[in-house]
Image: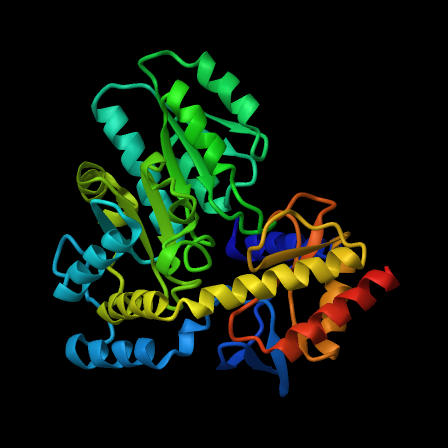
Amino acid sequence: MTSSQWDDAAREVLTSLHHAHLHRSRRVITPVDPVHVDWNGRRLVNFASNNYLGLTHHPRVVEAVEQAAREFGAGSGAAPIMTGYTPTHGFAEQRIAQWKGSQTSVLLPSGYQANHAAVQAFAAVAEKGSRPIRFLLDKLCHASLIDAVRGTQKPFRVFPHNGLQKLQRLLDEADENEIQVVVSESIFSMDGDAADLAGLAKLKESHPFVLMLDEAHGTGAYGPGGSGLAAELGLRSAVDVTVLTLSKSIGCGGGAVCGSTAFCESLVNLARAYIYSTSVPPMIAAAATAAIDVMEREPERQQRVRRLASRVRADLRSAGLDLPLGDSPIIPILLGSESAALQAADELADQGMLSLAVRPPTVPRGTSRLRVTLSSQHSDEEVQQLTHALRRLRDST
């Protein structure tokens, strides 16, 4: 196939995506502050960000970035196992581990890579130790977890969302020598509901397994000082490996894996996603450390976003919307078809609010939605404007 033939094939695929209302395009959006953006000359209230605590613009976080950039430059210049590991990286890893209650942690350039590195570490240790291993995933796990497990080419099974009875049956099937790694999120990214961590902890008592928990969306919104849902529920000891992103509540970028010293050392030595990546810039490590300090010193940010989430959910339920249980800042407005979700997003934009359509393959076909997200920095008036608009949207569909 020539390059021109490949381009023809690509254009054909893109045309089919357009016709199915599944084509994605980037839009240039200029952040104004934590909850407002400028898009095509329009100032919109941003209800589409994962910046749950508004820390992207916090003065202490921004100052930490500026200071680290002046001291270390804009990037790290190498992989961490070469020359890309500075004192700022080491301090951030210690701070994250202390905050999350683990022995140690490892920084990575993204949450996607952090999930890959953690899964690769499990698989590599099992392979080098000639031990069978199998991954068991909640059906609604993030794409990065699914891709990571598939990439190991190790056996895996999927159990229904929070379907602990099915999970127990899968565990019962296992050979006693087989390593069973159960993979879940704490707060699920598209539905905003929580994993049954208490049930997983109870099941672990009678059916030993290793629990890997992605706290990307639980971090910040839950737990003392934003340390996560497992910490809030007093279940840290049930979690063996925690993955978090620094790009959501923490407000900067990158990811981290938290676990035992043995696990994290195995990741550094065996996980290709870590070994072959340039390390996160020192200024991002400094920003993460500053953001954790802010979360611990300003618990009112977490308290406010949880209050707003409970208020919006109650208001929308009273209007007849069916929402998952919980009080997370992620609120899915199910609309069914791709075209309906796109139209709803356009209608909100016309009213001065940004909330984007989420469509397959990110969510199952027939469940296209608006993924509404809240921040502690949204005003009461902005949130009221949102709920009124969503009520009207509900009445018109």
Residue that sits furthest to the bottom in the current view: 41
Q: Report the side of 351 relative to 226 (left or right).
A: right
Colouring: rainbow
Q: How many marks?
A: 0
User: Residue shown at 52%/52% (left/top)?
Assistant: 2
Q: Is residue 167 above or below residue 102?
A: above
Residue 117 place in picture, x, y as percent? 31, 44
Q: Is residue 389 above or below residue 338?
A: below
**In this image, 75 relative to 233: left or right?**
left
Residue drawn 63% across the image and 47% down it: 325
Q: Residue 132 occupies which quadrant of the picture?
A: top left
Q: Give the camera-side residue of 196 and 247.
A: 196
Q: Position of residue 255 (x, y in %)?
A: 34, 56
Does the image show residue 386?
Answer: yes
Residue at image position (49%, 77%) is 34
Give left or right: position of 397 versus 52: right
State whether residue 70 is above or below residue 318.
below
Residue drawn at (49%, 82%), measured in percent from left and top? 33
In which quadrant will I find the C terminus? bottom right
Q: Nearer the viewer, residue 107 or 315?
A: 315
Q: Is residue 24 visible?
A: no
Q: Position of residue 260 (x, y in %)?
A: 22, 39
Find residue 60 and report its image quarter: bottom left
Image x and y of residue 150, in percent: 44, 34
